[in-house]
Image: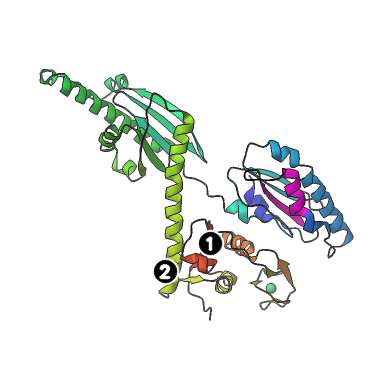
Amino acid sequence: MHIDRLARFESPDYPVLSVYVNRESLHESVRARLCDLLKPFKAFSNLDHDAQMSLRNDLDSVIGLADRIDLERSPATAVFACDGGGLFEYVPLSTPVWDVAFASDRPYLRPLRSIRHRDSVVVAVVDRRHAWLYSGGGGSVRLLEVIEESESHKGNFGGFSGYEEKGARNHAEFLERRHFRYVADRLFELQRKLGFGKLVIGGHEETSARFESFLHPYLRARLLGSFVIDPHTMSDVDITDRANVFLLDASHEAEEALASRVSVTSEEGGRAVVGLNDVLKAVNNGAVDHLVVAGRFTRGGVMCGTCGWLERSGENCVACGSEMTALGDVVDAAMEQVLRRGGQADQVSVSSPLDAHGVGALLRFSVRVA
Ligand SMILES: [Zn+2]
């Protein structure tokens, strides 16, 4: 995915067609859906002849992709096309977004930006004599390695000498502890090598609880939780599903925390604003550190072609007097400006106090928004 290249692409003379289509929950064919989405652009009369020809070629190319999109394994696909400007980008997406099409002077990237890059994760399924270590990110995990208890005999994990007389039960406990310590050390090594963000433990409830106490504090801080599974019948798909539940919960928690931080900071008169008008003012002033959008909140607006000033409406730029051009989604333009200036922009999918305002932002410095 060349999102940075797409973000830099601008085409003042020829429209850029951006199309997002989901295969899942589609009640009609991809071709029919594309035709619906693209219908409004067939009659784009405010363009000169060359721009119209470019757009017409792009519409034909995108409709021509229907069968390819239909066969795609990914749940959604994005296409960016600008025949006159030499852009054609076909991007299968790892998670569903929303169906939308825009023709503008640059690619519409908001649905692409809304895809949260899931944390990398390691799942350790542990029993008394084995450990199955899975690693993954972006929605699926795969088996990395299997550890057998006998491996813990190697290295500096000590022997049972001196304890044999305490009987078989203690011997079994000793072996379990040595095995757990070995697995915990291996996980710590893997964390340093792979740099995974989250850890999930699976197995029998009591075994997992005992194993957890062997984890390095650094790993315990990354532990999302544990789940019960029978190692003898589990599959990669089971592990992936379990890991995704934990990752999704963690991501929702992070979104909730972010949205409430914006609302609360703004309510308390701190460095935050809510509502589109105030957010646009803050963006225009280069004051936004973190833009946060509630769901698919979308509003039309205008942008100055010369200096990038954003407004809800108006014909001339208040900053430089140039002509303003219409935007289908001014929130998208605001996100791109914030990112270009080194800030962050996120779209949250959970319901939060930010829903009432549509959009909010944490600021680098206070701006007079009254
Ligand atoms: Zn301007």
The colour scheme is rainbow
Q: Which residue is mark 2?
A: 264
Query: Where's residue 99, x and y in %?
Result: 66, 52
In the displayed structure image, the side of residue 94 where residue 58 appears, left or right? right
Dot 1: what SS?
strand
Examine the rendering and report whether any part of residue 128 can be seen: yes
The residue at the far bottom in this view is: 370
Q: Quadrant of the N terminus?
A: top right
In the displayed structure image, the side of residue 341 where residue 49 appears, left or right? right
The residue at the far left in this view is: 165
Tell me which amino acid carries mark 1.
Answer: Ala
Tell me which amino acid carries mark 2.
Answer: Val
| The image quarter in which residue 105 lies | bottom right
Q: Which residues are magenta?
A: 11-38
Examine the rendering and report whether any part of residue 305 can be seen: no
The one of 97 and 124 positioned closer to us in this rendering: 97
The one of 175 and 218 positioned closer to us in this rendering: 175
At a point 83% along the width and 49% down the height, the residue shown is 57
Query: Where's residue 295, x and y in %?
Result: 55, 59
Closer to the chain start, of discs 1 and 2, is 2
The one of 172 and 9 positioned closer to us in this rendering: 172
Alpha-carbon neighbours of circle 1 within 10 Å: few (<14), some, or many (≥20)? many
Q: What is the C-alpha distance between the residues marked 1 and 2?
A: 15 Å
Which mark identifies residue 294? Answer: 1
| The image quarter in which residue 313 lies | bottom right
Q: Is residue 317 magenta?
A: no
Dot 2: what SS?
helix
Vertical placement of residue 296 versus 129, above or below: below
Vertical placement of residue 304 versus 128, above or below: below
Query: Where's residue 221, x and y in %?
Result: 33, 46
Query: Where's residue 36, x and y in %?
Result: 75, 52
Q: Is residue 13 magenta?
A: yes
